[in-house]
Image (spheres, grey):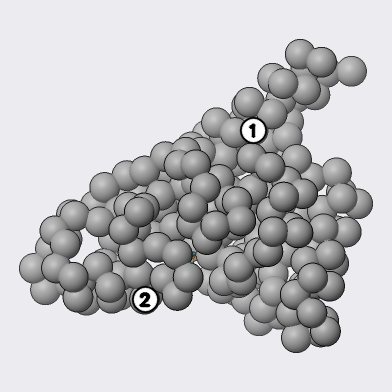
């Protein structure tokens, strides 16, 4: 049987503007080889869940606080992914670091968007606004965003796409965060998802 779309799960924690970019990308046809089938949030109050519901996408909350160990938390996420036969997992503002038990289960099947040009301002402790604070404190003139595969090293997996963004006089972390999202993240995340979904569909159909 030929497969025409890869099943996508998106993991979120907050506002979900990157999730929105994926939903919009699916509507506009930028994402033609994948279907967003499930959105999982570790945060029950994430606005991203509202965005998913508005788009008619199934949602689930897996709150780390409800589990005794990180292992149990990750197993609960795995169970949901496996039940729905998910092909690709997109971390879109997901603020939990996933352990080796999780990442090794999905080699080259988990992708993350990070708001800097890796290897700058990345790894443990660099997330959200902190990344932009660090870029401004260092005084770099160019920053950007990176989409990469997720492995056992935080922000250390193979790079899929990057886009540069200029820093401007008077930037605050908030202004810079918004520019990096608009000019880089919301563009390269849907493009990267389509690239990987296309590869998954082609490899399934070749079997
Ligand atoms: C985005 O800027 C994303 O790159 C970043 O958090 C923000 C989430 O916004 N992710 C990380 O820092 C991961 N290390 P969103 O919820 O509106 O997509």
List the single residue furthest toward the top.
206
Q: Which residue is mark 2?
A: 130
Residue 26: mark: none
Q: Quadrant of residue 65?
A: bottom right
List the single residue furthest toward the left.
169
Mark 1 burial class by Cα count in 10 Å: few <14, some 14-19, many 20+: many
Residue 94 relative to residue 184: left or right: right
The residue at the point 69 percent across, 53 percent down is: 103
Quarter holding the C terminus is top right
The location of residue 128, given as percent across then percent down, is 43, 71
The location of residue 183, given as percent across then percent down, is 31, 51
Q: Secondary structure at mark 2?
A: helix
Residue 197: mark: 1
Look at the numbered disc 2 and say if its residue's Cβ is closer than 8 Å to ligand 1.
Answer: yes
Residue 150 relative to residue 144: left or right: right
Closer to viewer: mark 1 or mark 2: 2
Q: CA distance from mark 1 to mark 2?
A: 31 Å
The residue at the point 45 percent across, 64 percent down is: 123
The residue at the point 84 percent across, 64 percent down is: 75
The location of residue 52, given as percent across then percent down, is 67, 61
Q: Is residue 2 above or below residue 166?
A: above
Residue 129 relative to residue 170: left or right: right
Q: Quick check: can you spot residue 36?
A: no
Q: Is residue 143 above or below residue 207?
A: below
The residue at the point 8 percent across, 68 percent down is: 169
The location of residue 172, given as percent across then percent down, is 22, 76
Mark 2 burial class by Cα count in 10 Å: few <14, some 14-19, many 20+: some
């Amino acid at each position: 049987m030929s497969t025409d779309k890869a099943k996508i799960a998106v993991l979120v924690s907050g506002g979900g503007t990157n999730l929105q970019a994926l939903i919009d990308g699916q509507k506009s046809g930028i994402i033609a080889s994948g279907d967003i089938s499930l959105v999982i949030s570790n945060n029950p109050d994430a606005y991203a869940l509202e965005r998913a519901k508005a788009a008619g996408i199934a949602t689930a909350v897996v709150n780390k606080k409800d589990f005794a160990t990180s292992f149990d938390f990750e197993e609960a996420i795995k169970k949901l992914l496996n039940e729905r036969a998910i092909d690709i997992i997109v971390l879109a503002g997901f603020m939990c670091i996933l352990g080796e038990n999780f990442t090794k289960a999905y080699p080259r099947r988990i992708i993350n968007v990070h708001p800097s040009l890796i290897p700058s301002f990345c790894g443990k402790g660099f997330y959200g606004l902190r990344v932009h604070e660090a870029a401004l404190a260092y005084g770099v003139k160019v920053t950007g965003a990176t989409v990469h595969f997720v492995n056992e090293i935080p922000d250390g997996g193979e790079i899929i796409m990057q886009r540069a963004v200029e820093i401007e006089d008077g930037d605050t972390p908030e202004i810079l965060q918004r520019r990096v999202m608009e000019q880089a993240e919301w563009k390269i995340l849907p493009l990267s998802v389509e690239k990987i979904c296309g590869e998954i569909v082609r490899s399934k159909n070749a079997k």
